[in-house]
Amino acid sequence: MAETKKMILDDNVAVPVHVGVIMDGNGRWAKKRGLPRKLGHREGAKNFRTITRHAKAVGVQYITFYAFSTENWKRPKDEVDAIMELFEKYLDEVRDFVEENIRIRFIGDRSALSENLQRKMASVEEDSKDFTAMTLVLAINYGGRDEICHAVKAIARKVKEGALDPEDITQDMIEANLYTEEIPPLDLVIRPSGEQRLSNFMIWQAAYAEFYYTNILWPDFKNEDFDRAVLAYSERNRRFGGV
Ligand code: IPE
Ligand code: IPE
Ligand code: MG
């Protein structure tokens, strides 16, 4: 058990099965220091590795990090290029997790990413597919609306082929066509940096998630802050529409 768990979390705490993290505030972190935004992204990328290991120690089974949204292409080209370069590095470093029994998956539309990135993603997914300690999900070129649109197209194709009656479409069927196939819904969404919105992150999967916001910028977000979020989650009363 992690040291920090002893400090903030005790054994009675209800650990969320699936935590989503919207890694926000890299740009403001850099600006505060008079540094270029890309250095904020570099710092944020380092932090994601620290928090991943800590989440595993706490007993989280799935952790999803929002790294790049389908809307982030709107940013200046040099910033987007710097982020894409970082992913290349990330993916080499993410390989370390393969030694730690962590399964790695990616969600999002890969077709817009470089072939090299796509190759690295497929290879790390393949090499970690039997690992069971925790699943690390990276959302890259991910958008919740885009994901639902993608699922609707797949289902519509079955209808067109005559293999499916529209009346037989179920929520399970929609879920099975999302990028998160076989990944449980989100229990807790953490968003640092002070913004209180989803920004198109897992809109289907977050339907009954608990939200935790903090003003801390992502590169400054520590293991202890993660524990505070888990503790807050543990004190919530989830009703799922019941009483
Ligand atoms: C999050 O940090 C990283 C990405 C969206 C890629 P931001 O770059 O959005 O940081 P702020 O919000 O400008 O501080
Ligand atoms: C959300 O952050 C996307 C990621 C963290 C990858 P943004 O910084 O893009 O979100 P908005 O624009 O503030 O809503
Ligand atoms: Mg932001």
Image (tube, rainbow, N blue to C red):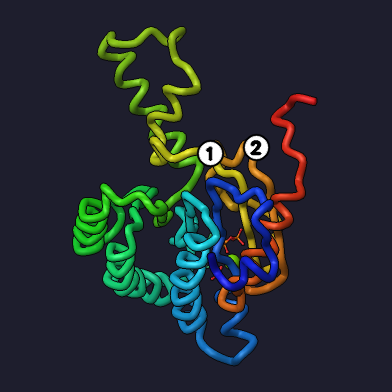
The residue under label 2 is which amino acid type? Tyr
Front one among 111 and 59 = 59
Res 208 label: 2
Neighbours of disc 2 within 10 Å: few (<14), some (14-19), many (20+): some
Percent x, y of residue 155: 36, 22
Front one among 119 and 31 = 119
Residue at x 60%, y 85% (from the top left corner): 31
| Rendered-image quadrant of the C terminus | top right
Q: Is residue 194 visible?
A: no
Percent x, y of residue 138: 41, 56
Q: Tell me if 164 is positioned left or right of 218 in this view.
A: left
User: Is label 2 in a helix, a strand or a loop?
Assistant: loop
Height in image: 138 above or below 28?
above
Residue at x 47%, y 50% (from the top left corner): 62
Task: Check contact, mark 1 vs mark 2: CB within 8 A.
Answer: yes
Res 185 label: 1
Residue at x 60%, y 81% (from the top left corner): 29
Height in image: 228 above or below 182?
below
Q: Tell me if 59 is positioned left or right of 101 in this view.
A: right
Front one among 22 and 162 = 22
Percent x, y of residue 67: 46, 62
| N-terminal-most mark, 1 or 2 | 1
